[in-house]
Image: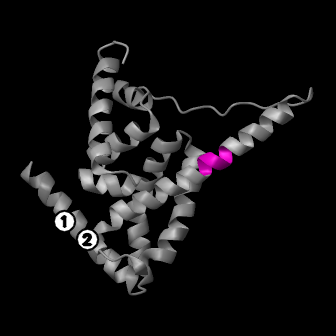
Amino acid sequence: MGSATARLNRERALDEYLVASAKLGEGAAMEQLARRWHPKLVAHAWRLTGEREMAREAAQNAWREILRGIRGLQDDRAFGAWAYRIVSRSCAREIGSAVRERDLKAAVAAEPHDLCAAPDEPAQTEPLRQAIRQLPAGERAAIALYHFEDMRVAEVAVALAIPAGTVKTRLMNARRKLRAILEGETP
């Protein structure tokens, strides 16, 4: 466990350095920051949206906002939570857009010559991943940020723009539901 903590501390220190350098306008630092964080941000977006293409679009839009706003970031150590929060907002916009598009498609579907097909979801074989996908989006995001991204409760709260108490409640509910799903019970 000590080596995992040391690795996490080194990664956070590197991120802090890269953020400070990017704020000074160093393009190479921003590129390295993007290489390190883009997969995490896309994964977070996918957990919120449930669709790969929408997640990629939301993450790409979030990067534009991150690039514009990084100089205003007060605490370099808060980059992760700040970036996740931007992605969360970007996902909300993408989902809103998808809902409007879905409503439009539903109206067009009334036409006899419409051929709309639902997008295929990626097949997940691992039981835990399948169970996590069954959770509501808020619980899915909280559990993933906390357990997969090693964020603290306060960081998850900032990333999701919710109070820390709500994060704790979502984590508790998600764990209870995951246990029930994995044991074959109805949550």
| Residue 133 magenta | no
Give the position of the C terminus as an image quadrant.
top left
Separation of marks 2 and 1 at Cα, in angstroms: 6 Å
Question: With respect to residue 20, does 152 lie above or below?
Answer: above
Image location (x, y in percent) of residue 45 = 48, 49
**Disc 1: CA contacts within 10 A as few (<14), some (14-19) or many (>=20):** few
Q: Which residues are magenta?
A: 94-98
The residue furthest right is 112
For badge 1, the amino acid type reads: Arg
* Whether residue 64 can be seen here: yes
Residue depicted at x 54% and y 51%? 91
Circle 2 — which element? helix
| Residue 97 magenta | yes
For badge 2, the amino acid type reads: Leu
The residue furthest top is 185
Question: With respect to residue 22, does 146 lie above or below?
Answer: above
The residue furthest left is 2
Residue 123 relative to residue 82: left or right: right
Residue depicted at x 45% and y 81%? 27
Circle 1 — which element? helix
Q: Report which residue position mark 2 lands on.
A: 14
Foreground residue among 174 and 58: 174
**Disc 2: CA contacts within 10 A as few (<14), some (14-19) or many (>=20):** some
Question: With respect to residue 53, does 41 lie above or below?
Answer: below
Residue depicted at x 34% and y 60%? 81
Residue depicted at x 44% and y 55%? 41
Image location (x, y in percent) of residue 100 = 71, 44
Q: Report which residue position mark 1 lands on.
A: 10
Image location (x, y in percent) of residue 13 = 22, 70
